Image (cartoon, helix red, strand yellow):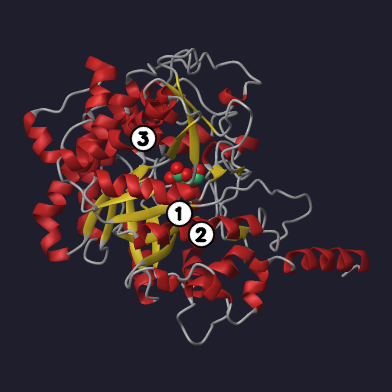
Amino acid sequence: MKFSYFIFHLLILQDVYSNSIINCQLRENCLEEEVKKSEFPDGFLFGTSTSAYQIEGGYIEDGKSLSNWDVYSHTNGSIKNGGNGDIADDHYHRYLEDIDIMESLGVNAYRFSISWSRVLPNGSSGPMNPIGIKFYNNIIDNLLHKGITPFVTIHHNDYPQELEERYGAWLSPFMQEEFVYFASTCFKNFGNRVKYWATINEPNLVSELAYMKGIFPPVHCSPPFGKCSYGNSDIEPLLVVHNSILAHAKAVKIYRDQFQVEQRGMIGMVASAYMYKPMTDDEVDKKAATRALTFHVAWLLDPLVHGDYPIEMRHYHGRKLPRFSYKEKLLIKKSMDFIGINHYSTLFVKDCLHSNCTCMHENNPTCSHGENRAILGFLLTSGQNEDGEFIGDPMGMPGLYVVPQGMEDIIDYIRKRYNNMPIFVTENGYGSNDNQEGGYDLDKDINRIKFHKAYLTSLARSIRNGANVRGYFIWSLMDNLEWNFGYTIKFGLYYVHPLTLDRSPKLSAHWYHDFLINNIQEKKSI
Ligand code: BGC
């Protein structure tokens, strides 16, 4: 090691060791001063989370067909630096190593998703791919062998491109039947070992990105939200969520009628769950913050618990909002055994019903990351208020801010609105853009540790207040393809080397390990 490099490293270490978080690893009693695993109920699932397209690679191997994301990522300019999921983290070939990593971390659960185009390359109109099935069987069996509970998301953004071409995918009611076929295939093949099923990941966010802003496939939007060749930003997101709700409920019915008694698992849906705070003390902004929660979170969850969309949404959208028939209402009501939430950030909300929010111009802080979002109920969301003050420290991932209190607040909202149903925090993570020339400093990971400690402390408070939270999954096990940001934004506890794809624990992996083995006498090293 060169001397200058050695001194440089020493300085960094000195700086790092002066931080109490690192001291935590060195002091015997430190975990007693901080959030502790013992503050969470027995049987609580502590895991990491990933999704198929973001980590697997193997994009045309062993019978897998092209997915919507394969096609999108191969379209010039879609993903930062020309990134794609062709190889990603090569988890398709390295899953055993990744399961070993999870074992050494000390997690007792792992949330991952199934690549639809690997298992059913042509959807319901073609044969099942036995090699795809075998791949997920191997993952499940190896997880169980290591004492790690599989928590499976059936659909997380990627579907066979053929379904896009045949029906227009989620815009079409035919996609409901396709999804039911896919979900049933999963229950049949994996359900004897999988006890936690999440049907669909975040339709309430994906609909906005793909059909309002047009920045996810199939790139649909209309002005003023974006310039796409197709789309209607006011209507399509509503249709997509409608079809997703019905697809979920139909799959749940099959699970409950045909599999659940024997397989004894739980099934739910995962919602994107931002927390919202009024930008000012004005009554209209306070109402707008409540409206944002209704139009973002309750839009998806109310139908699945109470059997219909929130009345406020009907009031604002009128006939644009699709209706459920009487029979459909019965089907969707109480169609979840648990609520999954992905919570990252809190945003300020400004009312646009009573004030002028023409926010499409730059240099206005209130407009930097939000717009007059029709599907959110005519309001504007932003990480900054009108004085330019941030709601919390910005993460490297644009649009996300560190606001730990938001965790307790969003759980509180869900607990009260949904009769304290079981909740899993299926994603929570810190997105950094710490790309460094000439390598990555694994020790420079203090912000991620601070983030998780603070959010877990907030979560522990909500549990003390009576919330029925059953699990917490860190997004993500390892750095991976962060959708449009490609490999430039990193959420992982493990760093993945861009050329060798070797995995190395960051400081946050060491911290999570310490946290998880808190109650175990003998510490295993990571
Ligand atoms: C998604 C993940 C994504 C993460 C960070 C969540 O909304 O489910 O796939 O990587 O956010 O952006």
Residue indicated by mark 1: 50
Q: Closer to us: mark 3 or mark 1?
A: 3
Pick the front one: 133 or 41? 41
Q: Name which residue lies at 16% across and 42% down.
A: 250
- Along the viewing direction, whichever of 451 and 279 lies nearer the viewer: 279
- Residue indicated by mark 2: 477
- Please say if the residues under marks 2 and 3 sit with CB atoms less than 8 Å apart: no
Q: Amino acid at mark 1?
A: Thr
Give, as a three-letter code, the residue at label 3. Answer: Leu
Image-based side of 30 in relation to 406, left or right: right
Give the residue displayed 30% in from the left and 25% down from the top: 238
Residue beneath disc 3: 293
User: Which percent across, then down, holds residue 468?
Assistant: 28, 59
Q: Earlier in the sequence, mark 2 or mark 1?
A: 1
Element type where label 1 sits in the image: loop
Secondary structure under the numbered disc 3 in the rendered image: helix
Look at the numbered disc 2 and say if its residue's Cβ is closer than 8 Å to ligand 1: no
Task: Assess whether mark 1 and mark 2 are in contact (beta carbons under 8 angstroms).
Answer: yes
Does 183 appear above or below 73? below
State the separation of the CA atoms marked 3 and 1. Answer: 26 Å
The Cα atoms of the two marked residues, 2 and 1, are separated by 7 Å
Quadrant position of residue 122: top left
Q: Position of residue 270 (x, y in %)?
A: 33, 46
Residue ID at (26%, 25%): 312
How far across and down, in percent of the image, does residue 300 sit?
28, 36
Query: Is residue 491 shown above or below 24?
Result: above
